[in-house]
Image (spheres, rainbow, N blue to C red):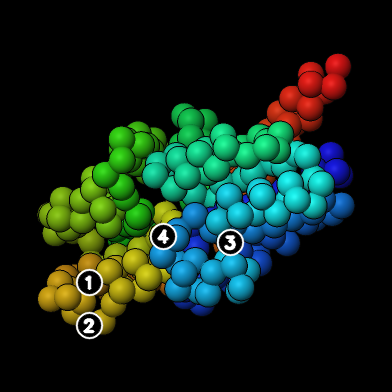
């Protein structure tokens, strides 16, 4: 598959957390050293904020058109999103309208097997459940695919039955409900773990901010009197999580090879 391009598609971030992208690219290059690797970013707002095409912040549509112009005929696209929601739909739309032969690697939480593996991959990050409450923080969405968070939460509580919570910035499960559960527990220490590929603006401001943002207190500020651990980086720095994305990529590369073989056979 050395003649196929490989495109990694992330939401994007304007924060220093974008070093996460270099971390996973290194792993991908180790696995596919002879494959042409490109990056695309699904958030139009962030692409514009970071300078757009001139600065290398391109949409998947732009990348696919460039590859086609270069004479490349096939590409594997790996989504680095967490759930198959709005941003992943942009990936699907882009490949549907592309002239290239493509195959798409699924987001992190796309099946029951993913839920189970991700819950296991977090084991080393979750502290003593008798002393700490751990809150996994997702971006959330009002898209129907947000149900993936609730499904994953069931696997999470089965794996960690005490004082491990999932809360999202937008949608359900809500921070308000999680906060009530924390206050009804006996713990005095709270650890936040980003359930996001990068720990960007939402983690820095909505969750761990020290000042009010638009009149609303951050989650951390609502936990006065608790010991707070906000040291965890995004999922893209978790080797076991990266392994899951790589498994999805391997499947996409394999599917692309089979697809091309059928067309040429």
Q: Mark 3 sits on what residue?
A: 58
Q: Mark 4 sits on what residue?
A: 194
Marks 3/2: CA–CA distance: 33 Å
Question: Would residue 7 be found to the left or right of residue 167 on screen?
Answer: right
Q: Is residue 123 visible?
A: no
- Assign a secondary structure to mark 1: loop
Disc on res. 242: none
**4 or 2: tag closer to the N-terminus:** 4
Question: Would residue 2 be found to the left or right of residue 185 on screen?
Answer: right
Q: Residue at x 64, y 58 (%)?
A: 39
- Assign a secondary structure to mark 2: loop
Q: Residue at x 71, y 34 (%)?
A: 101
Q: Residue at x 74, y 25 (%)?
A: 259
Marks 2/1: CA–CA distance: 7 Å
Q: Mark 1 sits on what residue?
A: 218
Between 8 and 265, which is closer to the camera in this rendering? Answer: 265
- Assign a secondary structure to mark 4: strand
Position in image of residue 177 (x %, y %):
16, 50
Disc on res. 211: 2
Crowdedness near tag 1: few (<14), some (14–19) or many (≥20) residues, C-alpha within 10 Å: many
- Assign a secondary structure to mark 3: loop
Q: Residue furthest front?
A: 69
Marks 4/2: CA–CA distance: 20 Å
Position in image of residue 99 (x %, y %):
67, 37
* Label 2–label 1 contact, CB within 8 A: yes
Crowdedness near tag 3: few (<14), some (14–19) or many (≥20) residues, C-alpha within 10 Å: many
Quarter of the image with the C terminus is: top right
Q: Which quadrant of the view contains residue 260?
A: top right
Crowdedness near tag 4: few (<14), some (14–19) or many (≥20) residues, C-alpha within 10 Å: many
């Amino acid at each position: 598959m050395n003649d196929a391009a490989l495109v990694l598609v992330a939401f994007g971030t304007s924060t220093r957390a974008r070093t996460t992208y270099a971390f996973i690219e290194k792993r991908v290059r180790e696995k596919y050293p002879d494959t042409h690797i490109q990056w695309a970013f699904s958030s139009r707002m962030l692409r514009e904020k970071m300078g757009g095409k001139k600065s290398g912040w391109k949409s998947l549509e732009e990348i696919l058109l460039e590859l086609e112009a270069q004479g490349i005929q096939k590409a594997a696209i790996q989504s680095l999103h967490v759930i198959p929601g709005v941003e992943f739909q942009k990936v699907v739309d882009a490949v549907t309208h592309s002239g290239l032969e493509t195959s798409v690697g699924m987001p992190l939480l796309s099946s029951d097997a993913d839920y189970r593996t991700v819950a296991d991959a977090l084991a080393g990050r979750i502290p003593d459940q008798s002393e700490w409450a751990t809150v996994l923080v997702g971006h959330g969405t009002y898209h129907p695919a947000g149900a993936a968070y609730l499904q994953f939460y069931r696997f999470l509580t089965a794996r960690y039955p005490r004082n491990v919570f999932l809360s999202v910035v937008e949608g359900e499960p809500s921070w308000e409900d999680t906060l009530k559960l924390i206050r009804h527990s006996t713990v005095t220490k709270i650890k936040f773990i980003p359930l996001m590929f990068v720990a960007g603006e939402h983690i820095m401001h909505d969750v761990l901010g020290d000042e009010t943002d638009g009149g609303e207190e951050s989650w951390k500020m609502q936990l006065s009197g608790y010991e707070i651990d906000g040291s965890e980086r995004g999922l893209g720095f978790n080797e076991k999580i990266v392994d899951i994305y790589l498994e999805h990529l391997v499947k996409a590369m394999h599917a692309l090879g089979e697809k091309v073989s059928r067309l040429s056979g």
